[in-house]
Amino acid sequence: MSFFDIKNVLIAKKNIYKKLNHTPIIKSFFFSKLLNFNLYLKLESFQKTGSFKVRGVLNKLNYISDIEKNNGVVSLSAGNHAQALAWAASEKGIKSTIIMPYTASKDKIKSTKYYGGNIILTKNNMLEECMRVMKKNNLTLIHPFDDDHVIYGQGTIGLEIFEYLKKIEYVIIGVGGGGLISGISSVLKTLNPKIKIIGVEPINSNVISKSLISNKPEFLSSNITIADGLAAPFAGNITLKYIKKFVDKVVCVKESEIKNSLKQIIKNEKLIVEPAAAATIAALVYDKISIPKKSNVLCLMCGSNIDTEFLKKLL
Amino acid sequence: MSFFDIKNVLIAKKNIYKKLNHTPIIKSFFFSKLLNFNLYLKLESFQKTGSFKVRGVLNKLNYISDIEKNNGVVSLSAGNHAQALAWAASEKGIKSTIIMPYTASKDKIKSTKYYGGNIILTKNNMLEECMRVMKKNNLTLIHPFDDDHVIYGQGTIGLEIFEYLKKIEYVIIGVGGGGLISGISSVLKTLNPKIKIIGVEPINSNVISKSLISNKPEFLSSNITIADGLAAPFAGNITLKYIKKFVDKVVCVKESEIKNSLKQIIKNEKLIVEPAAAATIAALVYDKISIPKKSNVLCLMCGSNIDTEFLKKLL
């Protein structure tokens, strides 16, 4: 028997759909023509707090005790998990503390505060800082990705994709720490083992590719990328187990490729997404994956939290 | 018996769904909270050519003869109908000529050309110019709104709204010449007469409001508005008949109100829409309509064809 049981994702669905909505899928006229696929976009960019992260967090908060809720939760994030945790914790009356890098986007810091999060900006190792704060204040860690309940929450996206597009053949997903791709791939491979799941990392932040080679969770000393949503400084034990079992391939894209694809999405699809989402399109546009023409391909638009000044420059 | 038969919209659906997709509806977290409604957005902004116009045009082109197809079609438009007609005609191998005002957005002119339209820019009265070109070259007029087959095409949006959101109580729609609101209101009132349909005009371009007062189709000598998608210089006999029968109220919004609401949509919903779409939100934000709190309200995001330079300034 597998370590993964889809029942847990169905339970997550019940847990989170009281507060969240499923997100739409559209066919991209522009990229379908450009790439000669039937190219679909899952618009998780319209999710509450602007990214998929809120699904996993909201599910996870159902599995901590009242004492833990009372003491508060803590995590580390460059921004999307921060906003998601701040919002979801506030919804449940829980105090949240989030360690963010001092280089984090101003817009993401502002939103996290708006949702009620207590932010600690750090120049130090984020994970170490998070552990220090957690122990000092007796907080409960809500891991950004390496947690089964978080993965089940992200897996609800897999249910939505399959429900809407049973004919889908390839699903392309951005990879940071791997929580999103773990959730979606485990669900889709369970529902139809023929669906191919491709992960995409920025070449500047490729901790999963490295971990797959060494066969253990690696750490990165540096991982600067415009796709901050994919900038995980380390891989997880749990996500690595999921990825090895359910993901067909992980490919890498360059910064310039992400940026060019992001421009194309905004200008031609009239869709505001963040660079992490554009990485999936970049993998197709810059031929990192061999997919037969006319295939039914879905790219996950994982979030919309793009810095306003950066967006202006792209237009 | 009514002059309207929903069967014609079901036929239009069959005619157009070979080439077009239905568009998604999302719940707006931001505006639901701000306005205390359950506020939904119909994202027709993701429609092919960037607006709803293509539905009506594509349906209409099924009802002209082979000789008419061979001679070519003509119309007048500030931009959205121009792009829609250019694309739909090209898809069917028909030559299209479109009279556009010399003040039309550069982006819209560029797109119309890209889709294969032959553009004539004019400083003169657009309707007179269109009639002149039509007669001279023996072309067939594809009216931007005052045509039953065009209205049936736009009505397919009504089918999609009802299918997705049976509980909807109020539908808010931007009004130019009235083709869109005629199509949607006739369908929704037929399916559920309790649904309230509210039209929104820019106060600077309020030809339908004026026509409803005088009870005949009026002309405007001037109608400059940032919501160029709603800038019809005249009302139609057919649309006026629909509006009088199926629309509950038409309200007006100011330019500043449209602009402020547009900013809010782009920044908070991460949605690129054109000012014509924002007029619907403005009518709610600036209290032009009395709607009970907690109501299920849908605003139609009719298009995404916003000028890039204007978009940059809004960010």
Image (tube, coloured by chain):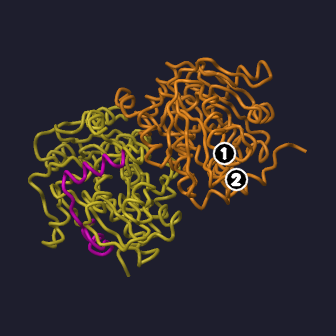
Chain colours: A orange, B yellow
Q: Residue at x 41, y 37 (%)?
A: A107
Q: Which residues are magenta?
A: B239-266
Residue B88 highlighted magenta (yes or no): no
Secondary structure, magenta segment, majority class: helix
Count of marks overlaid on the render: 2
Chain under label 2?
A
Q: Position of residue A110 (x, y in %)?
A: 42, 40
Give the amino acid at mark 1.
Thr
Chain under label 1?
A
Would you name the residue on which mark 1 appears? A140
Picture layout, residue A84 above or below residue B111: below
Towards the viewer: A71 or A308? A71
Picture layout, residue A36 above or below residue B50: above
Disc on the earlier residue, 1 or 2: 2
Quick one: SS at disc 2? loop
Q: Which quadrant would residue B147 be assigned to in this image?
A: bottom left
| For residue B258, side relative to residue A179 (left or right) | left
Would you name the residue on which mark 2 appears? A64
Q: Which quadrant would residue B88 be assigned to in this image?
A: top left
Picture layout, residue B215 above or below residue A157: below
Quick one: SS at disc 1? strand
Q: Residue at x 34, y 70 (%)?
A: B197
